């Protein structure tokens, strides 16, 4: 009662973190498909460090098994939509450059070089490892 008036000592929390069991829900596991590779790897390292102190309740495992295919499919669809947006941006850039920049010669602007630069940047974004 009124625990906020009687804070627990730091030693309590130290012992709690050292000995507690971590119960994971389905979303923690499903998010492994949603995270970047580096975030996923970090979380898996934490799971390994926790070892036998992780518990997955039956309901969480069931929800994971039921929802896993949809989460994977959703991620693939999202990636495909992103590639479509990038392709549309490329097409829009080409259209706008040749429509808006109505000149035959310009000492500092080259429409083809400008378009190549834009396409190169968008190609980098569409590469999953952003290299």
Image: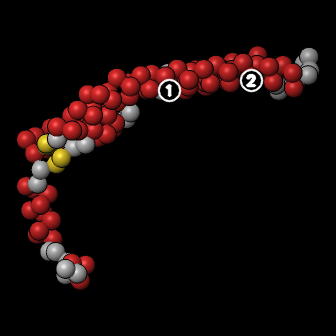
Quarter of the rendering containing residue 124: top right
Quarter of the rendering containing residue 49: top left
Indicate left or right for 71 with 4 as reference: right
* Residue ranking furthest to the bottom: 5
Instruction: Give the image's coloring scheme.
Output: secondary structure
Q: Nearer the viewer, mark 2 or mark 1?
A: 1
Q: Nearer the viewer, residue 81 or 122?
A: 81
Q: Is residue 43 visible?
A: no
State the residue at coordinates (16%, 37%). Answer: 58
Indicate left or right for 116 with 84 as reference: right
Residue 53 x, y percent position in the rendering:
10, 45
Indicate left or right for 81 with 74 as reference: right
**Quadrant into which the N terminus falls:** bottom left
Q: CA distance from mark 2 to mark 1?
A: 22 Å
Classify 10 Å Cα crowding around label 2: few (below 14), some (14-19), many (20 and above): some
Classify 10 Å Cα crowding around label 1: few (below 14), some (14-19), many (20 and above): few
Mark number, residue 93: 2
State the residue at coordinates (11%, 54%). Answer: 20
Indicate left or right for 31 with 79 as reference: left
Circle 1 residue: 78
């Amino acid at each position: 009662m009124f625990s906020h008036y009687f804070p627990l000592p730091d030693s309590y929390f130290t012992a709690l973190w050292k000995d507690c069991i971590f119960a994971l829900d389905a979303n923690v596991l499903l998010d492994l498909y949603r995270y970047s590779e580096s975030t996923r790897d970090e979380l898996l390292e934490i799971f390994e460090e926790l070892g036998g102190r992780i518990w997955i309740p039956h309901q969480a495992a069931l929800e994971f098994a039921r929802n896993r295919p949809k989460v994977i499919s959703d991620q693939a669809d999202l990636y495909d939509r992103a590639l479509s947006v990038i392709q549309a941006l490329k097409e829009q850039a080409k259209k706008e450059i040749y429509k808006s920049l109505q000149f035959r010669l310009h000492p500092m602007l080259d429409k083809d070089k400008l378009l190549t630069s834009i396409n190169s940047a968008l190609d980098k974004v569409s590469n999953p490892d952003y290299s």
